[in-house]
Amino acid sequence: MPTPTKQAPPSLQVDTARVVVVGIGLWAVALVVVLLLGDRVDALWTWTCLAAIGLGVLGLGVMRWQGQLGRKD
């Protein structure tokens, strides 16, 4: 097996909790816009926004359960 000529770049340090919280916030803004538009949009968009917010909260719960929240690497 040939040896690599270049070393792999270092891994990125990303605050995943912040990324998820920003995503939840954006979906919450989208939900407010959809609710303000009322009957002019399909009800499917309301459920899409609610599902995305719920999955984001669930994701934060999983990260907390796994011990990824509050940890500084």
Image: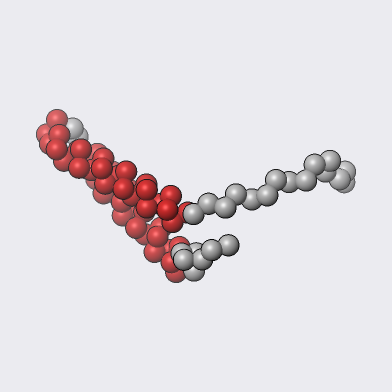
Q: Position of residue 54 (x, y in %)?
A: 31, 54
Q: Position of residue 50 (x, y in %)?
A: 26, 49
Residue 4 as seen in the image, left or right of residue 56: right
Residue farthest right in this picture: 2
Residue farthest front in this picture: 72
Q: Quadrant of residue 42?
A: top left
Residue 6 as seen in the image, left or right of residue 21: right
At 46% from the left edge and 66% from the top edge, which residue is drawn? 70
Quadrant containing the C terminus in the rendered view:
bottom right
At 32% from the left edge and 43% from the top edge, which residue is drawn? 26
Residue farthest left in this picture: 39
At 34% from the left edge and 58% from the top edge, which residue is drawn? 57
At 11% from the left edge and 34% from the top edge, which residue is drawn? 39
On the question of residue 44 being in view, the answer is: no
On the question of residue 14 being in view, the answer is: yes
Q: Position of residue 9 (x, y in %)?
A: 70, 45
Residue 58 as seen in the image, left or right of residue 30: right
Q: Position of residue 4 (x, y in %)?
A: 83, 43
Q: Is residue 62 above or below residue 6?
A: below
Residue farthest top in this picture: 40
Q: Quadrant of residue 33?
A: top left
Residue 39 as seen in the image, left or right of residue 55: left
Q: Is residue 58 above or below residue 38?
A: below
Q: How many marks?
A: 0
Which color scheme does this rendered protein use? secondary structure
